[in-house]
Image (spheres, grey):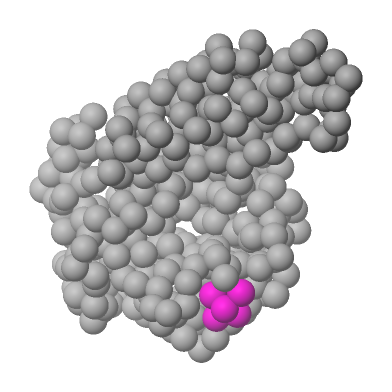
Amino acid sequence: MKTYQELQKLLDREITANKEEFAKLNDYMALHPEPSGEEYETSKMLVNFLRSKGYTVEAPFCGFDCAFHAVYGENDHTHKAAVFCEYDALPEVGHACGHCLSGSISLLAALSLIPLQDELDCDIHIFGSPREEIGGSKMNFAEEGYFDGFELATMVHLYNKNIIAPQLIALDSYMYHFHGKVAHAAVNPWDGINALNALQLMFHGMDMMRQHVKPDVRIHAVIKDGGTAANIVPDETSAEVYVRAPKWADVVEVVKKVDGCAQAGCCATGATWDKMRTAEPYYEVKPNPTGHKILEDIYEELGLETVDDLSEVFGSTDAGNVSYVCPTFHPCLQVVDEDILIHTKAFAAAMTSQRAHRTLEIGAKIIGYQIARTFSDEKILAQMMQDFKNEK
């Protein structure tokens, strides 16, 4: 077995040889953004690209037209690692989440790891993951068992800071529907049951509930349908509600309380209610101290200054569901100055900059070094798997 330093040199050589091709790939995706669930041309391009490089690619994958699964070689090594490739954009602001660059980073890393697969006795699988912004796909991959037997799953997300282990919290989302009885608001309002009043009381209940939930719980909601006309008692209304918390178990408990608020509004007005999920739930990304220490060392090796507060909340991701199946990592890599915020036009515009092209190389090294370090040392791998079991 080559030393870690020797593996790094091999990776550096491969990344340097391939980086220009992937910079062009990133720029093309940045300039041709496709929103979540509509990544038809992007996914087709990536599938054809990987096949041209000798990968075996399954597409469509897991019931998603724009998803794919790619592996190089016979897929017969002892170990298996997954690299997530995201490529969906946001409406109006394009790749303001940086998925064009993070996806290119993942592909550059995976391609550069090909010569190391035998040395590491590890197959590197690429999971093309559409819809991350509007409901995700990785949770479906996990639910269908595609990560069973894997010992690592990873990607790098772009941001305005370097964060080793951002707090990626659990999320559940529902559409609440209220059903009343229509009536003329002036002629016979007493014959009506006001579904909007029930919805309003639910919102008041949630607002009052906020002082009695943990400080790290997030509840946000919008009214989707508040009625049709002011002179008609609203008989059908609806609102979408998101509940987030650091642990999935806490989300479940808060959703029960939100249900109680909906029921209370109905008790006061005579309306009825029901709900339906608007997307599959996102679990939190479980911590893995051994894996995080590897990433911390890699960031230091690459001269990347990280934030002191490793608990900084970064939102929610479908990668959290994978962390319930195998050790999963989602570090953030700085690509813009701190005053440029993610999900903005300024962030999207930075995706084709020279700094983005330099970050492409750095991100590929982070993923490549992480996999090389993990699978070149059985003791490290065993400890990482023990950390994973301890979190279950």
Q: Give the range drawn in magenta.
A: 345-350
Residue 132 in the image: x percent, y percent?
A: 56, 49
The picture quadrant where one finds residue 136 is top right
Q: Is there any visible trace of residue 67 in the rendered image?
A: yes
Farthest-out residue, front: 187
- Left or right, 266 with respect to 385, comes to right
| Residue 259 or residue 389, whichever sits in front | 259
Residue in the image at 59% along x and 31% along y:
200
Q: Main secondary structure of the magenta part?
A: helix
Residue 338 in the image: x percent, y percent?
A: 39, 78
Give above or below for 171 relative to 297: above
Residue in the image at 24% along x and 77% along y:
305
Number of numbered tags placed on the structure image: 0
Residue 152 in the image: x percent, y percent?
A: 32, 46
Residue in the image at 45% along x and 47% along y:
317
Give above or below for 321 relative to 315: above
Give above or below for 334 relative to 234: below
Image quadrant containing the N terminus = bottom left
- Left or right, 45 with respect to 359, comes to right
The picture quadrant where one finds residue 96 is bottom right
Farthest-out residue, bottom: 354
Residue in the image at 46% along x and 86% along y:
355
Q: Is there any visible trace of residue 144 in the rendered image?
A: no
Give above or below for 382 relative to 252: below
Image quadrant containing the C terminus = top left
- Left or right, 383 with respect to 307, comes to left
29 part of magenta stretch: no
